[in-house]
Image (cartoon, rainbow, N blue to C red):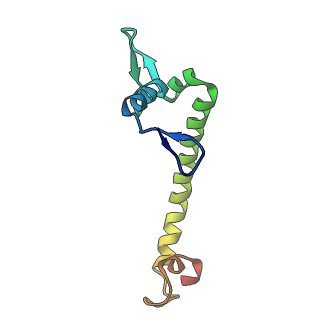
């Protein structure tokens, strides 16, 4: 074992086999029809996450809801940003792109 300079603890080299075992132990899985564990697919049903606790399921429902909210807000403001960007308030060389998207450029 080596001495770690930053903290008063002994340092050991990383063990990739232990890291892989830990990752396999901590990953979300479900029991398939054969009774074996399988990893959850990336695009799984959000209700399947309820088996890991209500908080995890609610967190992903929260993310889904607010991603839709922000998409709707973007769609509502995209047209006004486009109109402001094509305005004649600032010359082509004056200011940054952010300034040209404001109402002052109209």
Q: Residue at x 53, y 70 (%)?
A: 80
In the image, residue 63 sits, relative to residue 28, either above or below, namely: below
Q: Point out residue 19 in the picture as x, y percentages from the top left corner.
A: 42, 32
In screen coordinates, is 40 left or right of 49?
left
Q: Nearer the viewer, residue 86 or 20?
A: 20
Q: Residue at x 54, y 80 (%)?
A: 99
Residue lying farthest to the top in this orientation: 34
Q: Nearer the viewer, residue 66 or 87?
A: 66
In screen coordinates, is 38 left or right of 56?
left
Count of numbered badges drawn on the protein? 0
Q: Point out residue 29 in the picture as x, y percentages from the top left corner.
A: 45, 22
Q: Indicate the quadrant where residue 63 lies.
A: top right
Q: Point out residue 6 in the picture as x, y percentages from the top left corner.
A: 56, 51
Q: Is residue 106 visible?
A: no
Q: Residue at x 59, y 47 (%)?
A: 7
What is the quadrant of the C terminus in the image? bottom right
Q: Indicate the quadrant where residue 102 lies.
A: bottom right
Residue lying farthest to the right in this orientation: 55
Q: Is residue 10 visible?
A: yes
In the image, residue 101 sits, relative to residue 22, either above or below, namely: below
In the image, residue 58 sits, relative to residue 67, either above or below, namely: above
Q: Point out residue 17 in the picture as x, y percentages from the top left corner.
A: 37, 29
Q: Nearer the viewer, residue 96 or 36?
A: 36
In the image, residue 86 sits, relative to residue 32, either above or below, namely: below
């Amino acid at each position: 074992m080596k001495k770690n300079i930053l903290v008063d603890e002994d340092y050991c080299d990383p063990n990739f086999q232990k890291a892989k075992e830990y990752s396999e132990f901590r990953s979300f899985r479900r029991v398939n029809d054969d009774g074996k564990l399988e990893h959850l697919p990336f695009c799984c049903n959000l209700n399947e996450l309820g088996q890991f606790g209500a908080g995890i399921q609610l967190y992903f429902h929260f993310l889904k809801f607010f991603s839709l909210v922000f998409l709707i807000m973007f769609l509502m403001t995209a047209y006004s940003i486009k109109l402001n960007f094509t305005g004649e308030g600032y010359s082509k060389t004056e200011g940054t792109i952010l300034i040209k998207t404001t109402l002052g450029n109209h």
